[in-house]
């Protein structure tokens, strides 16, 4: 049910983009219909409005940020409701996308707090949740939220919902990919005519969900596999010591992140574990160990693909004598904004002999582990040398 794979009538739920006179108005677009029309009209893009994305899961953060950035929106991220409240007090946002289940302060509590501050009465707050039963959506409305985006995220529905709230459209428009041909084509297929197959992952659908940006997909799923191996081990340990609250949170996070990456079977198995914990049922440790083993195999396959199929840095320790400060300014800016596209900038500098092999590999490792601050220090040192 959480994956929205059944029709509106079959799952007896309301999938909505707007609240209408106290209730959500229903829309019947199925999740599976994720086609992307190539349109050559930049007027359809947004105008750099500032979005606050409130989400605790790092994989979901990356996926949503990639989608929003491709729509020409500025994106800031808060990892829980409490951080979101402080950020909203400190700076102006045009719209807030609010996850529901988060540690420290959940989405309901954060929204209620924000609505108590009269200066934010007009700020659109959109729920992001896989729970789309009518009572769940009514709870969102009662907390003060203005609309809803289902998880896993449907690119077109998200774009339409945001547009309706930013521009106050009275009637929803037909779903359309708000992208230019150039943006849709910015990520080339890793293999030109041959679709790479990954066990348990619908690669084609996942790349479509990211607006066709395959570079972002491969970067995100590689980090997902590596990080979730550790998380499933933590899940196992939490179950052993009886920390059910922590265990349930890990399972919930894995369910949502894997759904966003179109890993339907993994998401289903994580959902079953989450449901069992929540209802007080026994969870066999073998169930969790199976998840860890699957993720280990996934990580191994992705590592092999990275060696065989993705663009590699030309291995050389020869560095051009014409290295200037300007060569690293853009990279530094990307790192300071915690942008994973900085990996591509590193590769480009290495290919042009602006970075040696050792430095480029170190930077890529730091970026892929989200150690942006450490990577920025390395680049700051390079800037000093080039001055």
Image: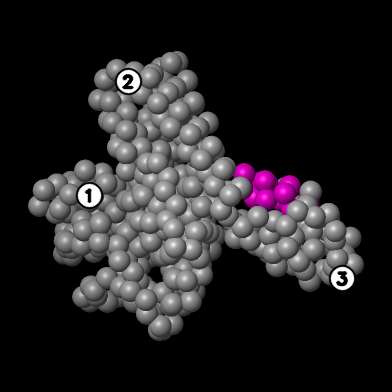
- Specify whether residue 250 is painted magenta: no
Q: Quadrant of the N terminus?
A: top left
Q: Main secondary structure of the magenta part?
A: helix
Mark-to-mark CA distance, 2 and 1: 25 Å
Picture disc at residue 83: none
Q: Position of residue 233 (x, y in %)?
A: 49, 26
Q: Residue at x 32, y 59 (%)?
A: 154
In the image: residue 302, left or right of residue 264 = right
Q: Is residue 223 visible?
A: no
- Specify whether residue 364 is painted magenta: yes
Considering only order in the chain, which callout, 3 or 2, is on the residue closer to the N terminus? Answer: 2
Tag 2, which secondary structure? loop
Mark-to-mark CA distance, 2 and 3: 60 Å
Q: Residue at x 58, y 49 (%)?
A: 308
| Magenta residues, start to end | 359-372
Mark-to-mark CA distance, 1 and 3: 55 Å
Q: Which residue is mark 1?
A: 5
Badge nearest the viewer, 2 or 3: 3
């Amino acid at each position: 049910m959480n994956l929205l794979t059944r029709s509106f009538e079959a799952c007896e739920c309301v999938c909505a983009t707007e609240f209408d006179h106290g209730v959500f108005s229903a829309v019947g677009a199925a999740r599976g219909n994720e086609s992307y029309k190539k349109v050559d009209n930049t007027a359809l893009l947004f105008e750099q409005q500032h979005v606050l994305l409130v989400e605790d899961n790092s994989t979901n953060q990356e996926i949503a940020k990639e989608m929003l950035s491709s729509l020409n929106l500025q994106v800031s991220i808060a990892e829980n409701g409490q951080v979101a409240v402080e950020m909203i007090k400190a700076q102006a946002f045009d719209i807030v996308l609010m996850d529901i289940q988060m540690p420290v302060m959940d989405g309901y509590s954060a929204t209620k707090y924000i609505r108590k501050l009269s200066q934010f009465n007009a700020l659109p707050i959109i729920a992001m949740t896989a729970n789309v039963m009518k009572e769940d959506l009514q709870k969102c409305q009662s907390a003060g939220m203005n609309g809803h985006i289902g998880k896993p995220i449907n690119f077109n529905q998200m774009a339409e919902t945001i547009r309706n709230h930013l521009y106050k459209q009275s009637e929803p428009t037909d779903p359309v990919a708000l992208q230019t041909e150039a943006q849709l084509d910015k990520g080339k297929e890793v293999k030109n005519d041959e679709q790479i197959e990954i066990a348990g992952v619908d690669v084609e659908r996942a790349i479509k969900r990211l607006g066709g940006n395959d570079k972002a997909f491969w970067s995100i799923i590689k980090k997902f596999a590596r990080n979730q191996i550790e998380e499933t081990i933590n899940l196992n340990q939490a179950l052993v010591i009886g920390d059910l609250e922590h265990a349930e949170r890990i399972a919930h996070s894995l369910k949502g992140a894997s759904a966003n990456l179109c890993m339907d079977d993994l998401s289903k198995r994580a959902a079953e574990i989450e449901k069992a914990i929540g209802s007080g049922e026994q969870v066999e440790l073998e169930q969790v160990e199976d998840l860890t083993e699957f993720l280990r195999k996934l990580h191994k396959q992705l590592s092999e693909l990275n060696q065989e199929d993705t663009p590699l840095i030309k291995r050389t320790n020869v560095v051009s004598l014409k290295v200037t400060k300007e060569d690293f300014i853009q990279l530094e800016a990307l790192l300071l904004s915690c942008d994973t596209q900085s990996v591509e900038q590193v590769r480009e500098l290495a290919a042009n002999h602006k970075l040696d092999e050792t430095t480029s590999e170190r930077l890529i490792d730091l970026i892929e582990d989200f150690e942006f601050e450490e990577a920025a220090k390395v680049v700051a040192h390079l800037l000093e040398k080039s001055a």
